Image (spheres, rainbow, N blue to C red):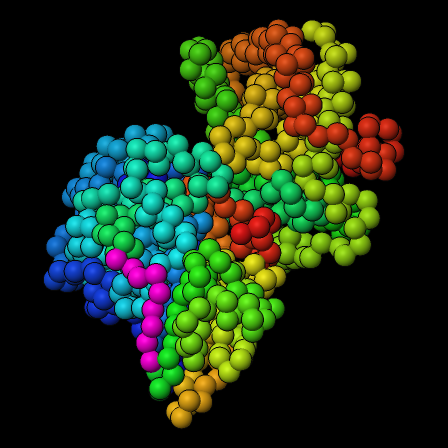
Amino acid sequence: MEVGMDTGSVVGRFHLPPGHTLSSLAQRLGRAGYLAGQHAIARHECLFVETQDGRLAKGSCRLSVRVTRRAPVWHLAGPDGESEAPFRGEAAFRSLAPDVPGIPSTARGLAGTRLLFPLVRLRVFAQETLLEGPSAAKFSLRAERILAAPPWESLPRGPWPHRLLTVRLREGNPDAFLHLAIYLRDRLGLPAAGGDACAVALQGLGLPEPGAPVPSHLQVRRDEAFAAAARKVVGQQTAKMRANIRGALEDLDPEFLHDLRVATRRLRSALRLLSDVLGLKRCDSLRVELGWIGQILGTVRDLDVFSINLRAQAQRLAEASAIAGLLVAELGRQRGPARDALVAALASRRFASLMRRLEALAGSSPPRSRGGRSGVPVAAAAPALIRKAQKRVLRLGRTIGPDSPAADLHRLRILFKRLRYACEFFREAFVDPVSGADPLADYIRAMVSFQDCLGEHQDAVMAMARVQELANEVVRRGTLAPERLLDLGALIQVQREIARDRRGRLARLWSRFDRRSVRGRLADLGVVSPPLPGAGGTPEAIPPEGKGGTAG
Amino acid sequence: MRIVFLSDIHANFPALCRALEWAQRHRADRVVCAGDIVGHGPHPTEVVRLLVEQQVATILGNVDRKVLALLENPKKLRKRLEKKAHAPAAWAALALGDAERAWIGTLPTELRFTADGIDILVVHGSPLSDTDSIFPSITAQALAAKLGRARPGLLVCGHSHIPFTRRIAGMRVINCGSVGRPVDGDARGALVLCEFLGRGQLTCRIRRFAYPVEPLLADLRSRGATGVVAEEYRTGIATKDE
């Protein structure tokens, strides 16, 4: 039923067109045998908060600081109903730790260690009434007029741009709810709303939902033409980039920067993989620009990751904690100029132009000529593409042993990333719509384990060189006492042990990935290679290699 | 005086809503439905409630009659769902509420009334039976055989889902087509607007109206209505004989 029903509780949400009020609705519904009670009126302002990855929304919860005539309160709306707790502290906050007193324990549990950020500010004027249906079922009807603004702006004056009707079944058969929902949709012509007041406000302001979930219009379908799907893939990743720019600019949480970098990387990979249906020249030029911003993002992110790793390792190595602290401070000093460069880049016209070009590509119409694989359905074209990437991973991976050079492992990691991204770009097209079974889930899981292990190995290798550089720097400055040099050696030894340990794990993880049953997942996609030029792993079919690869 | 005749809604609520809106917009004084209000579509209860709410004069169609017949033996309803021929009616019988079932049980099989001095006979299939069809190609002799002794000025029928208006042997014959399940290659719903101009003068026009198909298909899927080919709603072409 497409009336915006929540799972768990029976709730329907509709946009309320201008001219419709709760009274006029009650009157129309009265003709169909529904009896409405007295109206209650409420008015409040609220500031919704969320984690960077939208953990509260994923747990079907909305947390807000609500200001009514009384004192401000924490308001939590979740699957178990609504609750309030007193709010203590400053109303204007940049971010909050979830363990702040007053935050309901459900929200705290969902947020975990993540910080909470202001998401959107609303002023709501609500009217509510109870409704009894012809079959004695009881509903609550809530009509809301909503004014919205981004959290960093004050609420505008003027007309209420958003109007929302929420219908909740209070008592009775869910069928009775469906009858009412269908009546509202078809008879009264109320369009279904995509979510609650917070979601409607975000949509109206053009702000992304927390965690930047893929919007439904960008979801890749099994039967659509490959050229159209390729544009959707670009659109998905561009939207992810857009969603994380502000957080990265303001340094709200390192995860904003991480997600922005990952989206950049995925976009580069997508443009390489799908250049034949997106336009070779356009893709090449966009990849150069993405490489530019990716490098700037990578510099700051690498410092962040190294700093986080050093702190964690210092806890393991008690005697080296002082030297680790010294190195972390040095990294902090290096991060300043790197972040300045990042802020300048993200605020530059060059970056704005890149975003515009990416959005233009995502919104462009697929070519009319159906040559190559442009017109081939995703179900036929994607498996061939994935198999090709898999072949390259297998070719190199089977030659890797415990003594393989670090450069080979790094190369394998890059190939793994390409394969993983190819799988993830088209993953949803192969999910069974009825059972929800995901045939690529196990395959991707095996890949992620191996890739993570390779990543940790690479981080350790890089860290060894980095610790050496930092040591030289602090010795040169004279901020390191000679007796501390041994601690530095201990720290390098830790990296060496990590690298050795990860190498040791590789064979076991590879055997989990390179297994007939796991490889068979691709064959089970049930698609025969389409008759494409170069399909089947011939050298001409392999997309041209870029200099930097997709990693980085 | 203006009367809108419609037929064969087949539990398609969005289509009925648009049909009634159309009638209101064109200032119809009365709306008359020539049967087959349920069966096939996902909204039997909603359709019945709306017909009651809007006081639409309605007669029984063959599918409505089948639903009533199936309800006489409710224990076998689930089994009937598995049989292709009975599935749509059995599903509708299960989906209907008690009040709606009772209302269908009160419907007449034909309707006779006079408008501006013209005798009108409304039947579902033909005056012979609700499963007999009147097609556009019918001859005067065939019509006379179907009419028996009745000689109305206007004969209104449905059932075939193919709309037409004809004057045969001094009599006006109209088939309303189908509101909710057209099969004549036009996926839009059909109805007939009759304008009574006085002194026995009458104009009848077939009108088509579009309605949103996708919400209907979504409801078909989510409610699990059986025995229905979704593609028919998009194309307006039947994939099997009625």
Q: Measuring 20% from the left and 59% from the top, which residue is drawn there? A: A34
Position of the C terminus of chain A by quadrant? top right
Closer to the camera, A189 or B51?
B51
Q: Measuring 82% from the left and 48% from the top, which residue is drawn there? A: A371
Q: Is residue A149 above or below residue A262?
A: below
Closer to the camera, A507 or B233?
B233
Q: Measuring 55% from the left and 33% from the top, which residue is drawn there? A: A431
Q: Measuring 52% from the left and 65% from the top, which residue is drawn there? A: B134
Does the image show residue A1? no
Residue A259: percent from left, percent from top: 53, 38
Q: Which residues are magenta?
A: B106-114
Closer to the camera, A323 or A446?
A446
Q: Is residue A79 left or right of residue B180?
A: left
Does the image show residue A367? yes
Q: Check residue A311 for magenta coloring.
A: no
The image shows a total of numbered marks equal to: 0
Residue A194: percent from left, percent from top: 41, 52
Q: Is residue A3 above or below residue A291?
A: below
- Tell me the quarter of the picture where residue B51 sits: bottom left
Q: Is residue B194 above or below residue A132?
A: below
Q: Is residue B7 above or below residue A332?
A: below
Q: Is residue B176 left or right of residue A518?
A: left
Closer to the camera, A490 or A365?
A365
Residue A229: percent from left, percent from top: 65, 45
Residue A137: percent from left, percent from top: 19, 49
